[in-house]
Structures are given as structure tokens and as C-alpha cells.
Image (cartoon, rainbow, N blue to C red):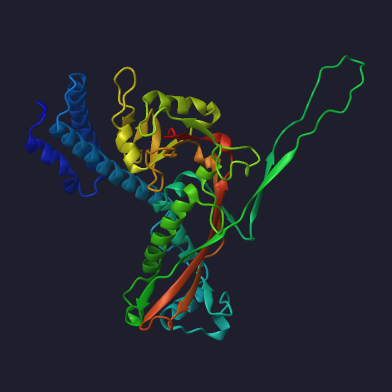
């Protein structure tokens, strides 16, 4: 065991998350203490490897500390997301824009009652568009839980699709004498890409008794049920969606990908790693410098939790760790000074995989939301439960491939 720490102290470190109870300041202090212990354990492991000796006890201890650091950093990231959501008013129902319609919607929600004079927004088959304040509540929750929505651009549309025009430039110029003739020069050309929303749905159910209970917060219940399913499906589609009734995933736009030729500005550039299962620190540095300086100010690393655990062990040529924990509330962990966004749907480090991305996603990826969340009340399919078939149309695709770079692991 390392001379820096006894087994008892190690167990205390690993249990610290239970003591901080969500206090973000305490979490930040704990993750920094734990990272200090991690570096000490890593130094001991490096010495073992230099002596060509690999102690399984030290390895196990290192992995447990690494996992603990990851757990606490994830808790900090969640707390930061909630702080951001509170700043934009998420997590609660806002001002009622149309009280009359909202009351009619609630009556239909509980009992299926629809007063003829108040059924504006109700489709012929009994579906309702959620009131504005409900729609906003669910959308704000999606922002809170969906990493891609936190870092990408979001465009709300009221039509079937959205077409983006791209200036492909091409305007020419030339030098001439004072009295020489001026011939016609080439003119800029334009390309376009269409973003079409697919439909995402959730189908939560409640008993009629639950709906009859006046104490039940229906808005909160619906938001919680819907955001869980919507966020899960969205997260997968924004990363690797094929564009058929769903968004185009940004990983499909890389060089050689299924949609490499879809965006008029070209494909996302890739950095191929030398190994099929490991990353060299210099390869991460190369990715940073592959990105034009105009896009580095708001750049993020995107990867899953497993990849973070691997990169946490990497050092630069001066022995400094590339990964650094949060030091201030509201700020994420960083790699090479750039924030890290944990995205569970990203691939693991594996042969021919695309586990890491780096870039300005605000300028690089566009999410399209079709206005309105629709709710269809179904009390017949699964008695005694009442189902609420809830749908929203969502699309997405790469906006500017120049602002994102992706690492590809070597082929076998």
C-alpha cells in the first residue's frame, strides 16, 4: 500500500460522497482531495511499472479511487446543470398564458371532459397541444438533463422542416490598371441542407384514482415522465442517429461516415489514433490544434464516463495531468484547459470506434424543435390505467463541420 494513505483513510475517501449530500462546495472540495490521492496512487503505479512490477493491490486501489473521482465529478456536473436550469427558470411551471385553455386541458387530463366552447387546440381524435407553460416546463427539463441541448444551438420552428443556406463563397477579384477594362469575376455559390424533425414519444400511465387526487402535481408528474424518455432517445439520436424519423447524429458526418457528403461544407475531420484501444497525450493536443482558433473559445470535449476514466491517467511531457477537476461551482472538469461534457451515448475506446469529440458545438450542431408537445388521453387500451401518449417532433444535424473534430481509434 502507498505510504501516503492507509486502507482506512482510503475507505473514508471513497465514502465521502455520502457525507456531502449534494452540497456543491463540499463536492468540489471532496473531488479535489480525491484527485490528490489519485495522483499519489498513480505515481506509485508508475514506479511499479518502471520496475517492471505490477501489484494487483495497487491497481485495484487506483481504479477504485479513479471511479470515486468520476462519481463525484458526475455529481458536480449534475449540480452545475441544476444551477444553470435555475438561472433560466427551469423545474417549475411558469406564468399561465391562457388560463381558460389550461383549465380545460386539466379537466381533460383528469376526467376526459372537454367543454365544446373550450376545445381549441384539441384534435379530432382527442389530442391536445400542451399549454405553453407545460411545454416550457418539459423543454427546460430537457435542457437540464440532455448534454447535447446544453452545448448545441436549438432552433424552434412552426413548419414541417427547416432549410439552412450555406455560403460556399467563390467570389473572385483581381488587380487592374487605372484605365484597364474590368472583366466579370466569379460569383459566390450557395448550398443548402434540410433539417426535418422526426417524432419522439412517451406513453406514461396513471390510474384514475391518481388523477382524481387533487394533491397530485400533474405538471410535475408529466414533465418527469416525459423528460426521462425524451432525453434518453434524443441523446442517442444526436450522437449517432441515421436521420430516418430522427435527428442526424454528428458522428455520422465524419470523414467516411454515412452522411459525410450531406453538409455542403464537407465532413467532420477525424484524428486517427495510433492504437486501437489507448490514447496518447500528444493525440489530444493534436486535436486541440486541429480546431481553428476561431472556434476554440467555446470548445468542449465530449466523451463518455469510461473514456474520462482512461484520460484521467494521462500526463503531458512535464508530468502534469491533462484532466483537472472542477474548482468553482458552475464550472465543469477540464482536459487541456477545455471543459468536458459527459455524454453516455458516446462509444467506448475500442477498435475503429469514435470515442472523443472536440469543438464548438454551439456553432457546429443544430437541434430543431417543432413547436408544441401533443398529449393524447387514452383510457381504453389498458384499463384501469389512463395513458398519456405524448409526442414532440425533434430534428437535428451538423451545422458547421469545421467547428468539430473527432478522434477515431485505429483499425485492428
Look at the image and tell me in which quarter the C terminus lies.
top left
- Who's the residue at 21% across and 37% down the image? 63
State the residue lying farthest toward the top.
Answer: 177
- Who's the residue at 17% across and 27% down the image? 54
Look at the image and tell me in which quarter the N terminus lies.
top left
* Rendering coords of residue 150 (x, y %): 45, 47
Q: Quadrant of residue 118?
A: bottom right
Q: Is residue 94 above or below residue 300?
A: below
Q: Is residue 244 above or below residue 312?
A: below
Who is closer to the viewer here, 69 or 83?
Answer: 69
Q: Is residue 243 above or below residue 103?
A: above
Camera sees residue 363: yes
Camera sees residue 328: no
* Rendering coords of residue 77 (x, y %): 33, 44
- Who's the residue at 30% across and 22% down the image? 320
- Who's the residue at 43% across and 82% down the image? 379
State the residue lying farthest toward the front.
Answer: 412
* Rendering coords of residue 30 (x, y %): 21, 38
Left or right: residue 100 versus residue 381 is right
* Rendering coords of residue 121 (x, y %): 57, 74
Left or right: residue 98 versus residue 2 is right
Q: Quadrant of residue 10?
A: top left
Left or right: residue 71 versus residue 159 is left
Amino acid at each position: 500500500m502507498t505510504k501516503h494513505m492507509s486502507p482506512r483513510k482510503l475507505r473514508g475517501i471513497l465514502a465521502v460522497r455520502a457525507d456531502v449530500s449534494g452540497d456543491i462546495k463540499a463536492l468540489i472540495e471532496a473531488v479535489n482531495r480525491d484527485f490528490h490521492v489519485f495522483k499519489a496512487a498513480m505515481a506509485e503505479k508508475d514506479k511499479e511499472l518502471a520496475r517492471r512490477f505490477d501489484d494487483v493491490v495497487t491497481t485495484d486501489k487506483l481504479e477504485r479511487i479513479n471511479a470515486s473521482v468520476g462519481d463525484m465529478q458526475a455529481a458536480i456536473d449534475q449540480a452545475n446543470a441544476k444551477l444553470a436550469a435555475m438561472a433560466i427558470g427551469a423545474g417549475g411551471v411558469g406564468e399561465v398564458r391562457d388560463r381558460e385553455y389550461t383549465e380545460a386541458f386539466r379537466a381533460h387530463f383528469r376526467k376526459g371532459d372537454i367543454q365544446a366552447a373550450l376545445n381549441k387546440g384539441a384534435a379530432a381524435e382527442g389530442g391536445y397541444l400542451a399549454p405553453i407553460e407545460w411545454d416550457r416546463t418539459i423543454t427546460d427539463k430537457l435542457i437540464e438533463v440532455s448534454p447535447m441541448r446544453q452545448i448545441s444551438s436549438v432552433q424552434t420552428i412552426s413548419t414541417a422542416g427547416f432549410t439552412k443556406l450555406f455560403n460556399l463563397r467563390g467570389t473572385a477579384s483581381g488587380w487592374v490598371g487605372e484605365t484597364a477594362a474590368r472583366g466579370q469575376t466569379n460569383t459566390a455559390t450557395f448550398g443548402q441542407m434540410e433539417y426535418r424533425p422526426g417524432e419522439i414519444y412517451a406513453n406514461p400511465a396513471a390510474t384514475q384514482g391518481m388523477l382524481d387526487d387533487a394533491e397530485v402535481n400533474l405538471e410535475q408528474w408529466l414533465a418527469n415522465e416525459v423528460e426521462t424518455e425524451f432525453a434518453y432517445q434524443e441523446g442517442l439520436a444526436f450522437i449517432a442517429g441515421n436521420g430516418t424519423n430522427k435527428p442526424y447524429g454528428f458522428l455520422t458526418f465524419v470523414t467516411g461516415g454515412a452522411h459525410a457528403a450531406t453538409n455542403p461544407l464537407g465532413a467532420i475531420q477525424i484524428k486517427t489514433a495510433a492504437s486501437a484501444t489507448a490514447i496518447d497525450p500528444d493525440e489530444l493536443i493534436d486535436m486541440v490544434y486541429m480546431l481553428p482558433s476561431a472556434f476554440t473559445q467555446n470548445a468542449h470535449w465530449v466523451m463518455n464516463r469510461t473514456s474520462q476514466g482512461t484520460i484521467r491517467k494521462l500526463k503531458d511531457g512535464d508530468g502534469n495531468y491533462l484532466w483537472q477537476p472542477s474548482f468553482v461551482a458552475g464550472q465543469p472538469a477540464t482536459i487541456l484547459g477545455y471543459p468536458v461534457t459527459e455524454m453516455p451515448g458516446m462509444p467506448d475506446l475500442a477498435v475503429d470506434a469514435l470515442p472523443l469529440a472536440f469543438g464548438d458545438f454551439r456553432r457546429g450542431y443544430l437541434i430543431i424543435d417543432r413547436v408544441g408537445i401533443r398529449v393524447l388521453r387514452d383510457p381504453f387500451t389498458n384499463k384501469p390505467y389512463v395513458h398519456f401518449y405524448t409526442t414532440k417532433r425533434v430534428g437535428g444535424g451538423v451545422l458547421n463541420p469545421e467547428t468539430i473534430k473527432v478522434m477515431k481509434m485505429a483499425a485492428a
